Amino acid sequence: MRITQGQFSFLPDLTDDEIRRQCAYAIDQGWAVAVEFTDDPHPRNTYWEMWGIPMFDLKDAAGVLLEVNACRKSHPDKYVKVVAFDSRKGFESIRMCFIVNRPKDEPGFDLARTELRGRNVGYAIRPYAAVRPAGQRYG
Amino acid sequence: MAEASPLRIETPAPDRVDLARLYGDSDIEKTLEEIDRELVGLEPVKTRIREVAALLLVERARRLIGLDTDPPSLHMSFTGNPGTGKTTVARRMAQILHRLGYVRRDHVVSVTRDDLVGQYIGHTAPKTKDVLKKAMGGVLFIDEAYYLYRPENERDYGQEAIEILLQVMEDHRDDLVVILAGYRDRMDTFFRSNPGMASRVAHHLDFPDYTADELCRIAELMADAMHYRFDAEACAALRDYVVRRMAQPRFANARSIRNALDRARLRQANRLFAARAAAPVDRHALQSISADDIRASRVFRQ
Amino acid sequence: MNKPMGRRITDLTQRFKSGVLPYRQMGYWDPDYAPKDSDILAVFRITPQDGVDPEEAAAAVAGESSTATWTVVWTDRLTDYPHYQAKAYRLDPVPGTPGQYFAYIAYDLDLFEEGSIANLTASIIGNVFGFKPLKALRLEDMRVPPHYLKTFQGPATGIVVERERLNCFGRPLLGATMKPKLGLSGRNYGRVVYEALKGGLDFTKDDENINSQPFMYWRDRFLYCMEGVNKAVAQTGEIKGHYLNVTAATMEDMYERAEFARDLGSVIIMIDLVIGYTAIQSMAKWARRNSLILHLHRAGHSTYTRQKSHGISFRVIAKWMRMAGVDHIHAGTVVGKLEGDPNVIRGIYDTCRETHVRQNLEHGIFFDQPWASLNKLMPVASGGIHAGQMHQLVSYLGEDVVLQFGGGTIGHPMGIEAGAAANRVALEAIIKARNEGQDIWHDGPQILANAAKTCTPLRAALDTWKDVTFDYASTDSVDFVPTATAAG
């Protein structure tokens, strides 16, 4: 399957140049760009690992590409995403988020149902890969 | 919001290029004139800048016409004594490169060894990379670059910074231009000991010391900007001062002139204040720096 | 032609003598009054009956929406009367519409109960709209001072936190209302939810009149919908939701349904405007306490918001709803099947989303309105829109909006999942192009066609609906255009 988190997951994977253009848009807006990675793609896993702190004060996206490629080289079999932070009042949150790297095989999620009272069902979603310990999940 | 794409050819290649039009469109004439105006003297430097500009312009024309070449190496070294205008020219060079489309933006990040090299193991690489990322898209100006190389100290991390710089200077020529600066002889030694660095620097500009006349002119320009005036006697005193000061150690060209001017202002102020009971001061008195204000300098007593 | 009917009477014996006095003599018309920062201000579009003096009409509106009655009463003198009177302080003719005026009225903060939309509305619109001397009356805009705003909760979740909960940034959210509106059984309903969410939408939605009917009782609907939602989450790895409509006959029933939705793990519930302002505020409070997103369907609003001369402008309703505390509100699409002039819609969207809305007569915004850090309200665009309009939607409506394609998803020739995918691909392609600096307004159709090359469902959507537009003259529009000299 293909996890469709992020802004552009329904489009063909972005080329380096396309990634650079998106980062350039973020930098032009004055946002800080960061790179994060994980091998736990559960939708409620909010905190992916940080590849360095967000890059404040950058004027050009080439610097971001350096880090993206360094992260992808270090963790070729993990999910890697680019995140842009806006510190302005009224937002003070993330403004962009898109995946730039995926494991070769994405087995997806197991959906476990627990039957409760009154025909209620409790749902537990677990990534198949999470059966293995962190660091050994993909590739 | 699309940024200028420096070397992308989208239309079919023309079979002739109007260099005059290209020159006009690039608007670098304005920058070159600014250099002429802002910098006193430095004729050899100004000539060299125009030569480099012409080279870059013709390179651009060659690419437009389809003579596909590797991106030219633009890294430079500026050698000369302090206060000879190296930082000023670096900023103007960034503008020229930007207007000709060789760098995406015209910012200059100015650093010395301490900004690049760490104090402990593992500290250098992220430090250098941070600086490089901030400079990307523009120009990185490294002052007194030779301090990166300290072979006598085996625990020195400067070599690591040099390695990273070399790699970026080679692989990211589209993204970054590096200008190294410092004293002539020390830069020569640095390049001899680091042939990798030497091979990546294509343009060497030497910044000669100013002549005494040029320094007087600089002093006059600086004074004028601050609304001060030298009368005829003061001008003569000024020239005497400059000649003597140049011969003394630690002379930093324009910077030393600036300091001298500040000291002269201090003396003028004290002179006027001491005589405050005599008469009110007029505009002329407040603007004038006298010969005495200059000759009071220590330089004349040595 | 009527003679001016005199200024305010200051001699108290004269002022409070039994009998009938014109409102303007009772102090309700006061052109010298400078509104205080703590006053609540309103601007009404008044159409006096023929022969009625416009200043008297404005004063009458001020009077009848505050302290007055049709005759003088002695008990007025037991109070600090001038303090409680609303003051009509300004009257402008409406450009290009003889016989219509904008009347600006100021109300003191003490007239209102803290944190109560019911009280605010009962005061301002409770009495005056049927008033005989007026042919027509419309509440156009209000300025609510921070002194009063801060007594309200504001949106329970708000745009920023909603995005953080959904982990969805940098693009509009996508939704779809279930079709057919009525008749599906719970099990079949859940099927549509599953297909649409699996295909790529973020939300699916109960329609406003889906509450609990013989063809589908609410508990069954909730159970089947959550089955569809959770299956879709497992298939995609994204957080998804279905707006479970908890509208019911009584508050007790509503709380029961909302609690069940919460216990099932839904991220969002939905209410209809017709439950009333008090119920809406209760549900907003509940939503914040239980960390659910609260969607409001504006059911019934067009009965009083649509005509330009009489009623309440929707921008005022939106303002009240942001104060009351809903997180989503239907606010217009511009290019879809329902009423919406672009300038009016822009003013409404700004009222929902901005932290400080600037006065802009060309967008129908009469007052500067700072929002005192009340959360931002997510506007929802729903009604007759399809993937082929994606570039127009993003251009008009921006990024912080929920785009709902009910028919545009469920009516797709290749099925619901394909319909959802077509919408999602269209949206991502337009956003990507916009970020790269392309001109999506002009090149949108080409960008969509290019994206359709690698997405057959999008190709089919573009082909099926390429000729669909809804071009009718708007019944509501702004009065101020850039070339006219706006009076302040």
Image (spheres, coloured by chain):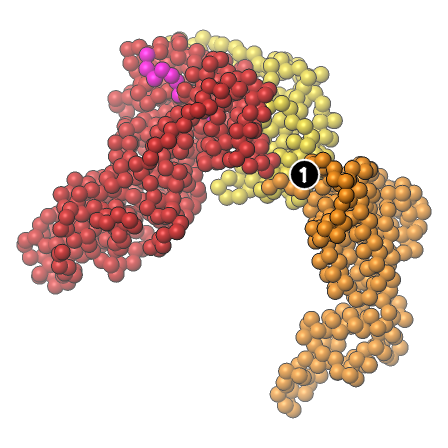
Which residues fall within the magenta stretch? Answer: C173-183
Chain appearing in red on the rendered image? C
Q: Based on the picture, tell me whether residue C169 belongs to the magenta stretch.
A: no
Would you say residue C455 is visible in this rendering?
A: yes
Q: Which chain is orange?
A: B
Q: Nearer the viewer, residue B170 or C243?
A: B170
In the shown orientation, is residue C220 left or right of residue B252? left
Q: Is residue B260 above or below residue B76?
A: below
Residue C326 at x, y percent in the picture: 37, 32
Image position, residue A59 (x, y; %): 66, 44
B191 left or right of A38 in image: right
Q: Which residue is mark 1?
A: A61
Left or right: C417 as drawn, with respect to C118: right
Residue at the image position 41 percent from the left and 21 percent from the top: C406
Q: Residue furthest bottom?
A: B278
In the image, taking residue C106 as reference, residue C293 lies left or right, namely right
Q: Is residue C147 visible?
A: no
Q: How many marks?
A: 1
A81 in relation to B177, above or below: above
Query: What subunit carries mark 1?
Result: A
Query: How many C-alpha atoms fall within 10 Å of the one at disc 1: few (<14), some, or many (≥20)?
Result: many
Task: Say which amino acid is labelled 1.
Answer: Ala
- The secondary structure type at the circle numbered 1 is loop
Q: Residue furthest left?
A: C18
Which residue shows up at 60% across the image and 33% down it? A83
- Residue B44, given in percent of the width and then of the height, sits at 86, 60
At which x and y percent is residue B86? 80, 57
Find chain A in the image and tell me its colour: yellow
Q: Nearer the viewer, residue A60 or B174?
A: B174
Residue at 15% in and 46% down? C49
Closer-to-camera residue (A14/B128): A14
Going by the picture, which residue comes out furthest to the front?
A: B15
